[in-house]
Image (spheres, rainbow, N blue to C red):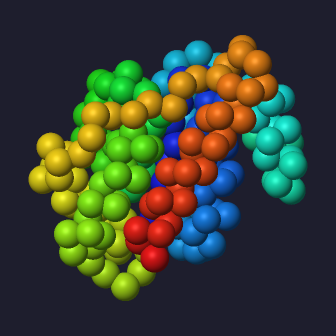
């Protein structure tokens, strides 16, 4: 399973998701990638995001930003965004990918709901995540209002730290609900 994290410029939030998810899942069958809906191409990760990840022992020196492509419908099995506009952009760029595209905090809420209601099926993490995706259209109305993770780009370090904490919180929730 390939999980794609998507933000606007692909230099702040989505690289954090790309590098952090493997630490939570510890499952080599689940790969991660990231891209941006607009803006930057072939840029390094933002220095503040790099600093946060470096403090965790994660090397981001080879990272280069890239843009979302229409091939998302076949390249990614799960797409996690940070803002509603990014989800809308993906629906325009790759309409078939819409059914597997979610805001990261919303997907975390979906995982909790599915676990609570007994909708999670399968024995592997991939099967469990796929069961949440398959049930998404049924459970979206049961979820709280969408929560975004604000873009820290060109803001103070505290904004990056806050985004990091929100990403980690959502990843912990997903990990626990699909354990």
Q: Where is residue 159 shown, x and y percent of the image?
A: 68, 26
Residue 62 seen in render? no
Name which residue lies at 27% across and 60% down.
Answer: 113
Question: Against 131, is 143 above or below?
Answer: above
Tell me residue 165's x, y (percent).
Answer: 64, 43
Front residue (pair 24, 37): 24
At x 42% / y 80%, what residue is drawn?
A: 124
Camera-side residue of 101 and 42: 101
Q: Position of residue 41 (x, y in %)?
A: 66, 23
In the drawing, does residue 141 fall left or right of residue 63?
left
Above or below, 125 against 165 in this view is below
Q: Residue at x 52, y 43 (%)?
A: 5
The outermost residue toward the bottom is 123
Quadrant for residue 133, please give it: bottom left
Q: Is residue 8 left or right of residue 18?
A: left
Which residue occupies the foreground of this view, 127 or 55?
55
Give the side of residue 24 with respect to residue 173, left or right: right
- Which residue is rendered at x = 51% and y = 32% of the image? 149
Count of marks, rendered view: 0
- Locate residue 177, reporting x and y percent: 41, 68
Q: Is residue 107 above or below residue 125?
A: above
User: For the N terminus, which image quadrant?
Assistant: bottom left
User: Residue 146: in sight, yes or no?
Assistant: yes
Q: Is residue 59 above or below residue 65?
A: below
């Amino acid at each position: 399973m390939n999980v794609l994290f998507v933000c606007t410029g692909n230099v702040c939030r989505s690289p954090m998701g790309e590098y952090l998810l493997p630490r939570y899942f510890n499952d080599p069958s689940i790969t991660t990638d990231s891209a941006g809906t607009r803006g930057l191409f072939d840029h390094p990760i933002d220095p503040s995001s790099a600093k946060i990840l470096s403090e965790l022992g994660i090397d981001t020196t080879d990272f280069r930003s890239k843009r979302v492509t229409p091939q998302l419908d076949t390249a990614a099995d799960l797409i996690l965004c940070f803002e509603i506009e990014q989800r809308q952009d993906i629906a325009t760029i790759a309409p078939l990918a819409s059914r597997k595209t979610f805001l990261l905090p919303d997907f975390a809420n979906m995982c909790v709901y599915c676990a609570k209601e007994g909708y999670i099926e399968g024995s592997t993490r991939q099967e469990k995540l796929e069961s949440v995706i398959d049930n998404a259209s049924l459970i979206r109305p049961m979820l709280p209002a969408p929560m975004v993770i604000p873009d820290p780009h060109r803001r103070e370090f505290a904004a990056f730290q806050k985004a990091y904490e929100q990403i980690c919180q959502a990843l912990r929730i997903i990990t626990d609900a699909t354990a």
